Image (tube, rainbow, N blue to C red):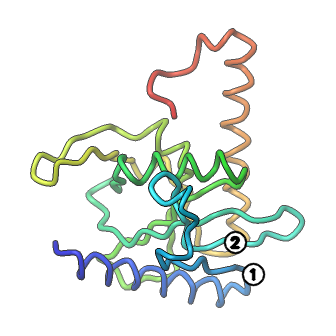
Amino acid sequence: MNREVIVKQGKDGEAAFQEWLNFQELGFLRVDQDWESMPAIFKNSVKRPDYLLLLASIGFIAIDVKNSKLNGSYFTLQINGEIDRSIAFEHYTRIYLWYAFKNKDTSNNDEWYFVSAHKACEVGLRKYNKKRNVYYYEIELKYFEKITRAEDLGKLFNARIGMLGKFTRAVEHGFRSIKDGVC
């Protein structure tokens, strides 16, 4: 797939997501994707999300929209230049970054599959694409939170709290139970 097709596919996904946000009457900020708007210090190391979604009484979460094909029971996410930079964004900003996947093979713009950057690292099956020379994760659909209404966004916090519980137990046991490969 050439670069122009990939960019158009991404823009189509972002437009569908913004339409969904407006329909759900959610507050958001669209992040400028212009290369010049990124500070030089972050240009090659920090992921810039597509949206900052404002959740009342909580604050912002970062959203990076993916308009991808659902491959059977999983979505894919590139590791180099994607996941690593998303984790860096969370580290520097202290704002959780979530991927919002839309199945590009369907016209349903009301169904979004959310997975946090950290969850993608934790559960993704690492694969290598020889043709494109990139590493990526296959992430099974069962690890995503299906979001169709604004009210469903609460699932995201339940998912993060569950991860914090795992981290707390790991700390209590001297980090012995942290799975290898967790970002």
Label 1 crowd bin: few (<14), some (14–19), many (20+), radius 10 Å = few
Q: Residue furthest left?
A: 131
Q: Is 70 on the left or on the right of 21, as rendered?
A: left
Q: Amino acid at mark 1?
A: Gly
Badge 2: residue crowd in 10 Å (few <14, some 14–19, many ≥20): some
Q: Are marks 2 and 1 in contact (CB under 8 Å)?
A: yes
Which amino acid is tagged 2? Leu
Quickly name the residue at label 1: 27
Residue pictured at 17% horizontal, 48% vertical = 133
Name the mark on residue 35: none
The part of the image, by quadrant, that contains residue 39 is: bottom right
Residue 160 in the image: above or below residue 95: above
**Residue shown at 59%/10% (left/top)?**
176
Residue 17 x %, y %: 53, 81
**Is residue 84 positioned above or below 38 on the image?**
above
Q: Residue at x 73, y 41 (%)?
A: 161
Residue depicted at 64% across the width and 64% down the height: 62
Q: Visible in this render: residue 114?
A: no
- Circle 1 — which element? strand
Residue closest to the eye, 36 or 155? 36
- Of 143 and 4, nearer the camera is 4
Q: Say which element carries label 2.
A: strand
Lower position in the chain sequence, tag 2 or tag 1: 1
| Measured Cα–Cα span from mark 2 to mark 1 | 6 Å
Write down the residue under mark 2: 53
